[in-house]
Image (cartoon, grey):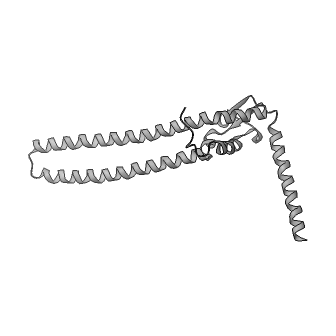
């Protein structure tokens, strides 16, 4: 008795799900304009999550390296301060200038590495956008839409024209975490 009831309930739930899914698909049919949240599409996709994790790892490594360098430089500065007691002003000035040049060089190098991380993020986003275009074009064709607009540029729209979640699902299925996607 219970298994029959459970089977009937399951069949009813599947029928309801199918009709809701069909209604959602039909609700986009004939829509000439769709909207998408591209930042969300990137950050919630497997591709974007992999990029974020990779960048977080690289950023953490840089932070650790910075801390180690700060410790080393602090130690050098302390040694320089101790040497000052036994040196002439001219001798100390030469060492102090050399230390200052070294510190500036290290800071510039670290700043360059952080800029490289930002550039890597931008390159990965660019690769993602290029890889997403055919998938978004496919969604446009299926719905008969002529245009996809960025959600933040739209003053008012119906949630039914937002394809962000569907795009994420398709991108995940097609691109995965993006490791196999090559740069354009």
Question: What residue is at 84 percent from the left and 57 percent from the top?
Answer: 13
- Reply above or below: 64 against 100: below
Which residue is nearer to you in this view: 58 or 90?
Answer: 58
Instruction: Give the image quarter of residue 130.
Output: top right
The answer, for residue 40, to whether it is visible in the render is yes
- Reply above or below: 116 against 16: above
Residue that sits furthest to the front in the current view: 180
82 left or right of 172?
A: left
Question: What residue is at 27 percent from the left and 43 percent from the top?
Answer: 103
Quadrant into which the N terminus falls? bottom right
Number of numbered discs: 0
x then y, percent, for residue 175 = 62, 42
Which residue is nearer to you in this view: 115 or 129?
Answer: 129
Residue that sits furthest to the top in the current view: 146
Quadrant into which the C terminus falls? top right
x then y, percent, for residue 88 = 8, 46
38 left or right of 61?
A: right
Instruction: Give the image quarter of residue 114.
Output: top left
x then y, percent, for residue 138 = 72, 34
The answer, for residue 154, to whether it is visible in the render is no
Residue that sits furthest to the bottom in the current view: 1
x then y, percent, for residue 45 = 62, 45
Instruction: Give the image quarter of residue 40.
Output: top right
Question: What residue is at 85 percent from the left and 60 percent from the top?
Answer: 10
Which residue is nearer to you in this view: 126 or 81?
Answer: 126
């Amino acid at each position: 008795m219970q298994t029959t009831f459970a089977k009937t309930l399951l069949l009813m739930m599947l029928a309801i799900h199918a009709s809701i899914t069909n209604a959602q698909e039909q609700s986009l049919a004939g829509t000439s304009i769709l909207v998408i949240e591209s930042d969300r599409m990137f950050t919630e996709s497997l591709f974007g999550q992999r990029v974020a994790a990779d960048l977080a790892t690289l950023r953490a490594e840089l932070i650790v390296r910075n801390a180690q360098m700060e410790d080393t430089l602090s130690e050098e500065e302390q040694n320089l301060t101790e040497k000052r007691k036994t040196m002439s002003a001219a001798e100390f000035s030469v060492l102090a200038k050399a230390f200052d040049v070294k510190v500036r060089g290290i800071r510039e190098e670290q700043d360059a590495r952080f800029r490289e991380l930002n550039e890597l993020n931008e390159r990965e986003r660019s690769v993602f956008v290029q890889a997403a275009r055919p998938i978004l074009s496919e969604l446009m064709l299926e719905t008969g839409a002529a245009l996809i607009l960025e959600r933040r540029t739209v003053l008012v729209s119906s949630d039914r024209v937002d394809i962000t979640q569907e795009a994420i699902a398709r991108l995940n299925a097609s691109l995965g975490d993006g490791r196999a996607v090559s740069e354009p």
